[in-house]
Image: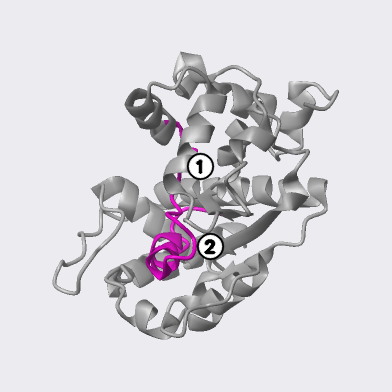
């Protein structure tokens, strides 16, 4: 690791010390320490891919296509506290370095592409072993966000209230909308903005030039965005990429009621500001 303190490294991730402390407390105790050899952990990897996003921005649908292409291995939220708990238990990881090494071995593609997706909080395990911020420029970074933050907040409000985060299959149906709650939706707007701010601070701190994807641009036809990801990482897209996108079973959950909630929230917000 470099000579910077862990607190300084955390701040370069876009997190505050309090946020980092909370995340460490959510990890298994044996994964809370520092130390490791990034060169050894990522030895099987030729391309390292990090996708940073805020919740309800379409990454599950998007990554499903990337994974089915076979080129990216298995991109998931590998580094969040829940994955750390289940992975450490499954692999009997003795340290965060052990956990990351096994994650890379398990989920990288045969050609050596390893990717994860997550909020800026997912960067913390990489800082614990010294991969970040030192080697940030060695990664291909992708960000995914929505222009319509209110619609995103309504989607997040709905998912948290119903426990339904994804709809798979056209006959699966959509969860009911919870009762309208201005304060509940406003809380999600604030959360999205805070997490997007963390991502932007990390990018600015490290002088990165990520590929920026926008949900509204790819939700109807992600082919161009998918090709852009392959190009950004330095891979050749498969000829059947459009077909893979069409075969995806994830269904957009927005409907007339969620749109009416977004319109109502926007009107009420305007009235309060006026």
Q: Which residues are magenta?
A: 53-81
Against 103, residue 225 (above or below) is: below
Q: Between residues 59 and 165, which one lies in front from this camera angle?
A: 59
Q: Between residues 197 and 96, which one lies in front from this camera angle?
A: 96
Q: Which residue is mark 2?
A: 149
Q: Earlier in the sequence, mark 1 or mark 2?
A: 1
**Res 104 label:** 1
Q: Residue furthest left?
A: 171
SS at circle 2: helix
Q: Between residues 274 and 21, which one lies in front from this camera angle?
A: 21
Q: Can I make out residue 271 in this image?
A: no
Give the residue at x 56% y 78%.
227
- Determine the image quadrant of residue 133: top right
Asked if the residue under mark 2 is in contact with the one under mark 1, i.e. CB atoms within 8 Å, the reply is no
Q: Is residue 5 left or right of residue 140?
A: right
Tell me where residue 143 appears, x and y as whole percent: 61, 60
Against 61, residue 120 (above or below) is: above
Q: Is residue 252 left or right of residue 124?
A: left
Is 66 colored magenta in this rendering? yes
- Determine the image quadrant of residue 84: top left
**The N terminus lies in which quarter of the figure?**
top right
Q: Between residues 211 and 199, which one lies in front from this camera angle?
A: 211
Give the residue at x 32% y 52%.
159
Tell me where residue 156 appears, x and y as whole percent: 40, 53
**Res 85 label:** none
Give the residue at x 58% y 72%.
230
Tell me where residue 127 appears, x and y as whole percent: 67, 32
User: Spatial distance from mark 1 to mark 2, Cα to Cα?
Assistant: 33 Å
Against 74, residue 122 (above or below) is: above
Q: Is residue 78 left or right of residue 114?
A: left
Q: Is residue 22 left or right of residue 208?
A: left
């Amino acid at each position: 690791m470099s000579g910077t303190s862990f607190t300084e490294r955390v701040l370069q991730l876009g997190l505050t010390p309090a946020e980092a402390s909370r995340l460490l407390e959510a990890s298994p105790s044996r994964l809370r320490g520092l130390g490791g050899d990034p060169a050894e952990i990522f030895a099987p990897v030729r391309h390292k891919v990090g996708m940073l996003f805020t919740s309800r921005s379409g990454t599950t649908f998007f990554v499903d296509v990337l994974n089915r292409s076979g080129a990216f291995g298995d991109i998931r939220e590998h580094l969040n506290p829940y994955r750390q708990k289940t992975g450490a238990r499954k692999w009997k990881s003795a340290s965060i370095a052990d956990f990351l090494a096994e994650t890379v071995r398990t989920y990288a593609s045969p050609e050596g592409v390893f990717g994860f997706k997550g909020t800026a909080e997912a960067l913390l395990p990489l800082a614990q072993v010294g991969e970040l911020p030192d080697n940030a420029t060695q990664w291909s970074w992708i960000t995914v966000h929505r222009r319509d933050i209110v619609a995103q907040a309504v989607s997040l409000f709905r998912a948290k209230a119903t426990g339904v985060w994804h709809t798979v299959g056209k006959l699966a149906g959509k969860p009911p909308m919870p009762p309208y709650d201005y304060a509940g939706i406003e809380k999600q707007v604030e959360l999205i903005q805070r997490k997007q701010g963390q991502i932007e601070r990390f990018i600015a701190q490290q002088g990165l030039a990520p590929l920026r994807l926008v949900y509204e641009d790819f939700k109807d036809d992600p082919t161009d965005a998918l090709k852009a990801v392959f190009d950004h990482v330095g891979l050749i897209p498969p000829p059947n990429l459009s077909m893979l996108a069409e075969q995806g079973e994830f269904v957009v959950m927005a409907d007339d009621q969620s749109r009416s909630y977004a319109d109502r929230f926007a009107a009420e917000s305007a009235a309060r500001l006026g």
